């Protein structure tokens, strides 16, 4: 997960990586095991993708305002507070969000116990993490770059509430409340933008006021999330130790995959910075940022496909195959569109970023493969997550770190980009071969777009245009 350095840590992280929202009145209840029709699934992808774009725009806007009004020192302090919260959320959640989606999506009878377990875990684990941050800021201030302890303390108060929101959003996904998920997911960055404008521009206060406003927003959003879940599903307070143990078993396997992916995607930038300096790392950061934005759409598809798979009994992965093939077509289009953007990077960022063009072009094939893998693998995350998937990520992680440490010192950011593409391609091949073995689908059926796929995508686009 990457925190929005201008505001709250993102409450929904898997996937990780947000305004065509569906009206709340259009939400339909899907019974356990029922599957959303392909057209409605595609419509929800479009709505969620539009929501994520709004979230990205709000995050950029609040970052710009905060940086200009706080200056480098104040903005740096704000960044440390929010990255600390994001890291605590990543560690504390430990795969539980995905476990909630899997168990509730698979059997709605688990809703009450999963919701009770989630709330209990968020309060206990989130409070413990928040208290740990406060204590560490007092006894080890150097760990946080000597950011004032009072800033970290105010930010730490939000951690249990952010965790409530995170787990609650995944409950909404599991019970097919996608529109409500989008509304609450978008609330955080929009409130952060509002807070930034009010705290810094209107009342001309400073970083302490902004962090305080953002903490208050986190509390309000978590309470709203609880209210929405209670109103939508009316779960009873029914914690279950036996279900919690099963959830933890699943969560740990998923967590290994998530952490492996995060390290592979992020660690190379730190290695470039260590061996080649901040200037080269800055150029590579721009190329990596564009590559990350390219993964936004497949990330949305994977997010919505996961509960869909968990609620079905499709051993042949028919729907996953269709969605993966559509994603393959869309990613090919996105990659082609990104090529001229790569050549425009020196114009946008300045001549010092000229090598970002080559780096992004090197990253493109890897982005294509990892994006398709992120969709295809939902068949396994939604059917129990066999141990082979985290094993594949651990293997890829070891290879990626080893190659980066060998080649980056001598060849720099271009080597890091090439190793990323190699790593992304490796995890894609491993999962694709395993998918072929377990489902019996030919790889050409999974990845090669058909003429009908383009027709279907155009039909979905027309439907979304004329229905809004």
Image: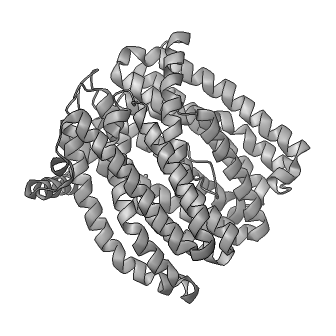
Residue 403 to residue 318: above or below: below
Q: Is residue 319 left or right of residue 388?
A: left
Give the colour scheme shown. one colour
The picture quadrant where one finds residue 60 is bottom right
- Front-most of 425 and 239? 425
- Front-most of 42 and 329? 329
Residue 2 to residue 106: above or below: below
Q: Is residue 37 visible?
A: no
Q: How many marks?
A: 0
x, y percent for residue 267 = 59, 57
Residue found at x 82% / y 40%: 134
x, y percent for residue 101 = 42, 29
Q: Is residue 397 left or right of residue 39?
A: right
The picture quadrant where one finds residue 320 is top left
Residue found at x 43% / y 18%: 111
Outermost residue, bottom direction? 351
The picture quadrant where one finds residue 88 is top right
Q: Is residue 434 visible?
A: yes
x, y percent for residue 177 = 37, 33
Residue 286 to residue 292: above or below: below
x, y percent for residue 308 = 30, 33
Residue found at x 85% / y 47%: 150
Residue found at x 24% / y 37%: 437
């Amino acid at each position: 997960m990457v925190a929005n350095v201008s505001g709250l840590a993102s409450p929904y992280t898997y996937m990780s990586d947000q305004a065509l929202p569906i009206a709340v009145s259009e939400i339909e209840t899907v019974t356990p095991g029922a599957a959303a029709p392909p057209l409605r699934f595609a419509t929800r992808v479009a709505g969620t993708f539009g929501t994520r774009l709004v979230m990205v725009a709000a995050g950029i806007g609040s970052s710009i305002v905060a940086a200009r009004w706080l200056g480098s020192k104040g903005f740096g302090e704000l960044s440390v507070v929010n990255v600390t919260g994001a890291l605590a959320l990543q560690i504390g959640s430990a795969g539980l969000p995905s476990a909630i989606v899997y168990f509730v999506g698979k059997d709605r009878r688990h809703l009450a116990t999963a919701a009770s377990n989630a709330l209990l875990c968020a309060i206990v684990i989130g409070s413990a993490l928040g208290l740990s941050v406060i204590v560490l800021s007092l006894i080890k201030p150097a760990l946080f770059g000597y950011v004032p302890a009072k800033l970290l303390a105010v930010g730490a108060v939000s951690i249990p509430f952010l965790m409530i929101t995170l787990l609650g959003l995944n409950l909404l996904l599991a019970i097919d409340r996608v529109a409500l998920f989008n509304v609450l997911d978008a609330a955080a960055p929009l409130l952060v933008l509002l807070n930034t404008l009010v705290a810094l521009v209107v009342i001309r206060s400073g970083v302490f006021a902004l962090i305080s406003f953002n903490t208050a927003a986190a509390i309000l959003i978590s309470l709203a999330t609880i209210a929405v879940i209670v109103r939508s599903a009316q779960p009873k307070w029914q914690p279950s130790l036996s279900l919690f143990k099963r959830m933890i078993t699943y969560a740990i396997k998923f967590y290994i995959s998530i952490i492996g992916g995060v390290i592979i995607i992020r660690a190379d930038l730190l290695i470039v910075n260590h061996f080649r300096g901040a200037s080269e790392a800055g150029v590579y950061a721009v190329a990596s940022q564009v590559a990350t934005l390219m993964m936004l759409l497949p990330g949305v598809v994977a997010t919505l496909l996961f509960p869909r798979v968990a609620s079905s009994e499709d051993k042949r992965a028919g729907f996953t195959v269709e969605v993966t093939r559509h994603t393959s077509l869309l990613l090919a289009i996105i990659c082609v569109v990104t090529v001229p953007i790569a050549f425009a990077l020196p114009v946008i960022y300045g001549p010092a970023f000229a090598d970002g063009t080559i780096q992004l072009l090197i990253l493109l094939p890897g982005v294509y493969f990892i994006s398709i893998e992120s969709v295809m693998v939902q068949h396994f995350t939604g059917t129990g997550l066999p141990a082979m998937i985290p094993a594949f990520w651990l293997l890829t992680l070891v290879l990626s770190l080893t190659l980066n440490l060998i080649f980056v010192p001598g060849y720099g950011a271009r080597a890091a980009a090439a190793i990323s593409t190699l790593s992304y391609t490796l995890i894609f091949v491993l999962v694709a071969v395993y998918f072929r073995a377990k489902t019996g689908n030919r790889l050409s059926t999974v990845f090669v777009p058909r003429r009908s796929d383009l027709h279907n995508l155009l039909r979905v686009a027309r439907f979304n245009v004329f229905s809004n």
